Amino acid sequence: MSIKKEYKSFVENYSPFPWEVNPKEIREIFSGQHTFEIGYKRFFYIFKYLKEINKKISNPKIIDVGSYPGNMIKLCKYAFGSYSKYYSIGLDIDNNFISEVNKYGVECLDTEIDPQFPGAKEPKNWSPSNLDVCLLLDTIEHLVNPTYCLDKINKSLKSNGYLLITTDNISNFFYILKMITKGESPNVNFILSSKFYIGNNRPHHREFSKSELKFLLEYSGFEILE
């Protein structure tokens, strides 16, 4: 079976966590859909990279930073067959989430990952170490100080461990077109940003170009593979 067919089968047979389908979704195209249906193409690439890593590492130790809604737990289980450890890192993780993911052998760590955010909580020590894979999906754009989180991840991973990141690319064609035609920045409006917002539901702080993200990763000691 090709990797595209394998992923398609996973999505078609996927059983989402209850909170993955938003009953108040106002966008008709996404109404009643779970996270893998909404982000089909993006998560396909994550699946593709996980399968490539699986050729080198079996039964890995995984850390998922900014892990809500927990969908990567099931994708990793499908891609690797099994994992020896899975850590879920987040802020104000509720008991319902903890109870559900514990069924998959997931250990939750409720901690601040961005201590420079206005009104940030006290960070806790990251105990996970010697890990094979880290997932940082749609999270780095929310961080006031991404180097703090990247440094923590780097210390948690093995020297040959893998970090997979997804984030919006500020230099993509549609953002450029929006700036040219409307004069609007693709970054979140100031009133909705962490310049003004203080709380746990963290908004975007800024979005990155590929070169900016490359700089941050190399500054924190990562080698860019792709």
Image (cartoon, rainbow, N blue to C red):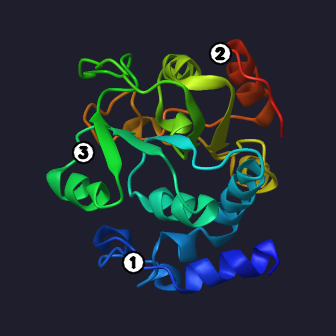
> For numbered disc 3, what is the local secondary structure?
loop
Foreground pick, 187 / 11: 11
Q: Which residue is mark 1?
A: 26
Residue 185 in sight here: no
Under mark 3, the amino acid is Ile
Residue 144 in sight here: yes
Q: How far apart are the two marked residues, 2 and 1, measured between alpha carbons?
A: 39 Å
First in sequence: mark 3 or mark 1?
A: 1
> For numbered disc 2, what is the local secondary structure?
loop
Q: Is residue 70 above or below residue 26?
A: above
Q: Position of residue 110 (x, y in %)?
A: 27, 35
Q: Which one is in front in this view, the residue at disc 3 or the one at disc 1? A: 3
**CA neighbours of label 1 inside 10 A, class few (<14), some (14 to 19), many (20+):** few
Q: Which one is in front in this view, the residue at disc 2 or the one at disc 1? A: 2
Could you say which quadrant of the image residue 114 lies in?
A: top left
Q: How far apart are the two marked residues, 3 and 1, measured between alpha carbons?
A: 26 Å
Name the side, left or right, on which 155 lies relative to 200: right
Q: Position of residue 43 (x, y in %)?
A: 63, 62
Under mark 1, the amino acid is Ile
Q: Which residue is mark 3?
A: 93
